[in-house]
Image (cartoon, rainbow, N blue to C red):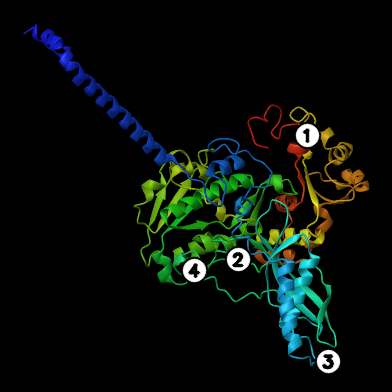
Amino acid sequence: MLGRPGLHRIRSSRPENLGKNNLRMIANICLTVFVIAALVVTIIAATYEPDEPLFDSPTNITTSLTSTPNSRIQSDNIVVRTGDDLLAANQTALATLINVADAAETNDTSTDETGSSGCEFDPKDPLDCRDPEVFQSMMQKAIERFKDIHFNRFGKPTPGPEGNTCDMAWRFRPKQGKATGFNKDYRRFVIDRSENCTVSVVSIGEYHSGVNARKKKKTNKNQIPGYEPASGMQDQGGFSLPAAGEIVKDSLPVVESEKEFIRQRYLIYVGGGDRCKSMKHYLWSFLCALGEARYLKRTLVMDMTLCLSSIYTSSNLDEEGKDFRFYFDFEHLMQASSVLDQDQFWNYWEKWQRKDKLTLYLVEDFRVSPKQLTKVKHSLIMRKFGFVEPDNYWCRVCEGATKSVVQRPWHLIRKSRRLMDLVAAIGSKLNWDYDSVHIVRGEKARNRDLWPNLAQDTSPDALLSTLQNKIEDGRSIYIATNEPETSFFEPLKHKYATHFLNDYKEFWGDRSEWYSDTAKLNNGAPVEFDGYMRASVDAELFLRGKKQFETFNDLTNDCKDGVNTCGTAGS
């Protein structure tokens, strides 16, 4: 018995058995490699996050919005990148641009047809603004005058207040600059008509002077049957592009009926430590909640008021009661996702909860994952957050394994159309023909330990030296800066035509459209044009410059986040 194993080893090592053993060994190795490969592929498939076709990858977006991992979000007063910033320059959507040759060709055809039919008119009769020749002449003149913009679409002309005036609207975007999306303008044309019936444009009015061509605001109760995102929201090319200058329709949605309210399922986040943090922190947490609501196919019940951090306020204090619509495009959010104002929600809940036996499911631990809530049938899921930071941040829900399940829908957040209207108005004043310089000073310029060269590198003399071979003499320069005293840059005026945000205060002053619109959202009380709004408009105007120069890329060798950080953080 004891000798048999040895005998077995001797037999198995005989020459005639070596081939079988090798084949068995090779088969085992192949099987092992196959199992490992299958495991690796499975892990990759489970954790892979594909890039959005129209947006930066989630990793890049995350990196651009927070420089620290997990919930440790730094307070920063820079403007947060939103969906309109992340839109790629989709060439399919921008392919339908109109040029002067198109207008001239159509105009020639219209002229031939008019000439062959004779010419009879009473000089006292008002001009027919719908006449094809009038329309084509207006379109051609607009394209010839505004050489620094791409025209995407013209609206039909409408009669002006005088018999020889017509108002016309168009959709456009600047030819140069990094910004995407369209703007809308409408102007008044003065038109001359000769004895042989030919028409010519005498003059074109200022930005938004053609008020009769502005689309009238339709009566809209904002009823949301089924809380389904609106259809038909996509533009050419299969995706929606932001358009400034259109009528804003962002009244709060109203529930259509009791039946619709009780049919829906809801998600709400309450409490937590996110209040009065930076806007970056607010969006990072809010979009976590919105992402979970979309994952669970529930309506997000959201607080329409923000607490604006002291880093953006003139009082240097946190300020409550700021409307979400002051800063972001709520109309687009309503069209693309299912949301409801929490004040309205609680009114409906108190009205129908007992009658219809609506139920609430309370979650007090952020570690309860969205996957665990998919089978919850209660009418309302309430995530309640405590008082201990940072575990009471909403964004903790989207950390760990949940990160690959719940995607933050960055494309749903866009800057307020009211703020983008200011950008379009100021850009039009500059004829979209300017270069831009972003100059960071303030606290960073005073902190020589972290930014030893910044103050000197952004001084007027240093700026003139740096820009002299980059920007031609006499060019218009838009300076986006946090330097409160623009007189500091006075020496630059001897070489360039300098422009600052404060040069255009009339666009948000007490007689402006922005002033009246925001006051309506604020129960009639005037709204301050605060620091975050200023930074948003400044940043957008900077992006529309033909040439753009950044502080930490072009003006100084200091690192954006301080000494020895250039290799660890993007600038």
Three-letter amino acid code of the residue under disc 4: Ile
Quadrant in which the C terminus is drawn: top right
Three-letter amino acid code of the residue under disc 2: Asp
> Marks 3/4: CA distance?
50 Å
Viewer-nearest of discs 2 and 1 = 1
Residue 511 visible to the viewer:
no
Viewer-nearest of discs 3 and 4 = 3
Secondary structure found at label 4: loop
Query: Residue at 37% of width from left, 51% of height from top?
Result: 374
**Occupied quadrant, residue 71:** top right
Which residue carries the number 2 mark?
250
Which residue carries the number 1 mark?
556
Secondary structure found at label 2: loop
Which residue carries the number 3 mark?
124
Relative image position of residue 475 (x, y in whole percent)? 86, 51
> Marks 1/3: CA distance?
65 Å
Relative image position of residue 500 (x, y in whole percent)? 82, 51
> Marks 4/2: CA distance?
13 Å
Which residue carries the number 4 mark?
224
Quadrant in which the N terminus is drawn: top left
Circle nearer the N terminus (2, 1): 2
> Marks 1/4: CA distance?
52 Å
> Marks 3/2: CA distance?
44 Å
Relative image position of residue 201 (x, y in whole percent)? 82, 76
In depth, the one of 544 and 315 nearer the eye is: 544
